[in-house]
Image (cartoon, grey):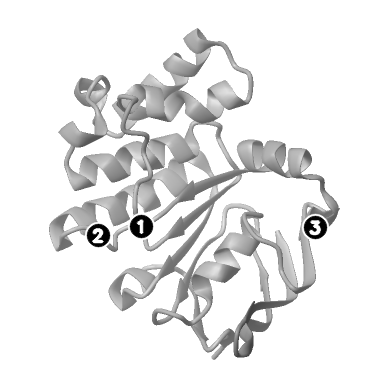
C-alpha cells in the first residue's frame, strides 16, 4: 500500500484545521513499522485514511496498484473486509455477543456460513489462549482478554495488513507487554504487514522501522 502527499483538513467555525500536511508512506508485504508521536500529531488520522475509514482532502492512495480513492462504498467495504484488519485502543466488542460470536462477525458479513465462521473464530481464540473464554461476554472478560478477542476479530479473515491504533494504551504494563509480544508472534506466523500507531517509545523502538510524526508531518 502506498500513500502519496496525503493532506487532511477539517472545517470549523474559525476556519480550516490542517491535520496532515503532505505525508507519504509505503507499506511493503510482510513489513512491520511503527508510527510514533504525541496526541494530536495526526498519526491516527493517517492510519484511518490508509485503512480507508476516512478520505484525504487531497493526495493519492493505492493498494497493489489499485486506486483506493476511486472505489465505491460497497467496494471499499469488501476491500477492508478481505485485505485489512483493525485493532483500536478500545476493543469495540459488541456487548450482546460472546467472544466467539464477536470474532465471527467479519466472516458473517462476508457471507460465510455460521459453521465455517465459528470454526475460524474458535481456531483463533485457541491460538490466543482464550478457548475456555469463548462463550463469555465482554463484561466477563479482563482488559487483556478483551483486546485479544478484538485482535482475533481483526485477523479472522486473514488480512494482508493489520492496522493497530494505540492497541496497548488502556492496559497495565504487564498486560501491555504480553499484547506487544502477541503482535510480533502473529506477524511472523501469519505473514502479515503490521502498522502500529503509538506514543509509547519503548513499544515503537521494537520495530525495525519507525516514523515519527509531529504537527501532521514526518520529523
Pointers 1 and 3 in contact (CB under 8 A)?
no
Residue of label 3? 69
190 or 48, which lies in front?
48
* Secondary structure under the numbered disc 2 in the rendered image: loop
First in residue order: circle 2 vs circle 1:
1
Q: Are marks 2 and 1 in contact (CB under 8 Å)?
A: yes
Q: Quadrant of residue 171?
A: bottom left
**Residue 218 percent location from the top left of the image:** 57, 86
Q: Residues within 10 Å of mark 2 (few under 14, many from 20)?
A: some
Q: In this rendering, would 118 be left or right of 11?
A: left
**Depth check: 91 or 207 in front?**
91
Q: CA distance from mark 3 to mark 2?
A: 32 Å
Quadrant of the snapshot with the N terminus:
bottom right
Q: Residue at x 51, y 73 (%)?
A: 43
The location of residue 32, given as percent across then percent down, is 51, 61
Q: Earlier in the sequence, mark 3 or mark 2?
A: 3
Amino acid at each position: 500500500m502506498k500513500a502519496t502527499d496525503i493532506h487532511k483538513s477539517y472545517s470549523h467555525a474559525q476556519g480550516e484545521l490542517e491535520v496532515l500536511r503532505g505525508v507519504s508512506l509505503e507499506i511493503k508485504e510482510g513489513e512491520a513499522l511503527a508510527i510514533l508521536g504525541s496526541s494530536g500529531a495526526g498519526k491516527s488520522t493517517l492510519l484511518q485514511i490508509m485503512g480507508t475509514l476516512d478520505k484525504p482532502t487531497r493526495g493519492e492512495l493505492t493498494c497493489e496498484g489499485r486506486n483506493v480513492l476511486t472505489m465505491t462504498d460497497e467496494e471499499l467495504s469488501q476491500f477492508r473486509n478481505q485485505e485489512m484488519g483493525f485493532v483500536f485502543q478500545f476493543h469495540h466488542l459488541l456487548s450482546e455477543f460472546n467472544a466467539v460470536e464477536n470474532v465471527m462477525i467479519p466472516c458473517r458479513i462476508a457471507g460465510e456460513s455460521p459453521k465455517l465462521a465459528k470454526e475460524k473464530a474458535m481456531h483463533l481464540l485457541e491460538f490466543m489462549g482464550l478457548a475456555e473464554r469463548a462463550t463469555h461476554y465482554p463484561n466477563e472478560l479482563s482488559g487483556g482478554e478483551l483486546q485479544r478477542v478484538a485482535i482475533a476479530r481483526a485477523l479472522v479473515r486473514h488480512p494482508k495488513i493489520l492496522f493497530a491504533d494505540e492497541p496497548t494504551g488502556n492496559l497495565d504494563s504487564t498486560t501491555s507487554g504480553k499484547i506487544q509480544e502477541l503482535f510480533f508472534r502473529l506477524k511472523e506466523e501469519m505473514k502479515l504487514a503490521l502498522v502500529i500507531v503509538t506514543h509509547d517509545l519503548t513499544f515503537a523502538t521494537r520495530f525495525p522501522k519507525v516514523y515519527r510524526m509531529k504537527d501532521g508531518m514526518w520529523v
